[in-house]
Amino acid sequence: MVEISEKAQSYLRDLLSEQNDGAVGIRVFVAQPGTPQAETCIAYCRPGEAQDDDVPIQYEGFTAWFEKRSESYLVDAVVDFQEDRMGGQLTIKAPNARTPDVSEDSPIEDRVNYVLYNQINPGLASHGGKVTLVEMVETDEGHTAVLQFGGGCQGCAAVDITLKQGVEKSLLEQVPDLVAIKDATDHTITENAYYQ
């Protein structure tokens, strides 16, 4: 899945040895996978912080936990350590992190982000706008996507039309698990609004 070079392993061992708890490992995951904003992350993973479906891999001196949801986005990823005048830095190259990998079995967040970034945001970009997923809220009725508008859509006089006739309609049609869309944007800020 992920190749961690010997130099990177040595660097990580040194970092982890500075922690008070010898059982601290690392957790590797992709935030906003399959979108242009995807970011591959390495974080400390203290005992009890790993998710139930994380995949643990034992390296010499530490355990790396890989997020199950990020597995397909971490294919061919390489973690390395590059020395420089300031000491060096850990580098992560994950060529598939931004590649959409969505199916009916994908987590609902991935399916919503796929529609937002590949179908809705390109249209909103013509007005300098965008919409992002803030969180998914699960209720007895089903999933609600909490969205935030930005750029020309924040404070725009036509945002209700955009939300109801564009964003909400597209998401509810293409992600059947969704039952509702909620706008969490503060529309009192109108400096960049496309329509005032």
Image (cartoon, rainbow, N blue to C red):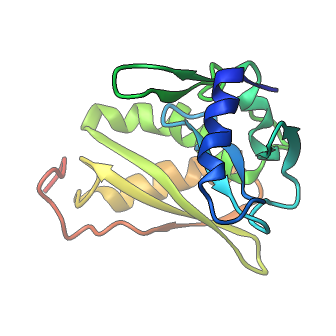
Residue extending furthest toward the bottom: 140
Q: Residue at x 48, y 37 (%)?
A: 37
- The location of residue 51, given as percent across then percent down, is 80, 60
In the displayed structure, would residue 92 be above or below residue 14?
A: above
Q: Quadrant of the C terminus?
A: bottom left
In the visual, does 189 lie left or right of 186?
left
In the displayed structure, would residue 98 be above or below residue 184?
A: above
Q: Quadrant of the N terminus?
A: top right
Q: Based on the displayed image, in which of its 4 quarters is residue 145 positioned?
A: bottom right
- The location of residue 116, given as percent across then percent down, is 53, 42
Is residue 192 at all visible to an observer of this figure?
yes
In the visual, does 159 lie left or right of 26?
left
Q: Residue at x 88, y 41 (%)?
A: 58
Q: Residue at x 78, y 30 (%)?
A: 72
Is residue 164 or residue 110 the one in the foreground? 110
In the displayed structure, would residue 18 be above or below residue 66?
A: below
In the visual, does 28 lie left or right of 118?
right
- Mark count: 0
Q: Based on the displayed image, in which of its 4 quarters is residue 3 positioned?
A: top right
Is residue 100 at all visible to an observer of this figure?
no
- The location of residue 70, given as percent across then percent down, is 74, 40
- The location of residue 160, given as percent across then percent down, is 36, 62
In the visual, does 90 lie left or right of 67?
left
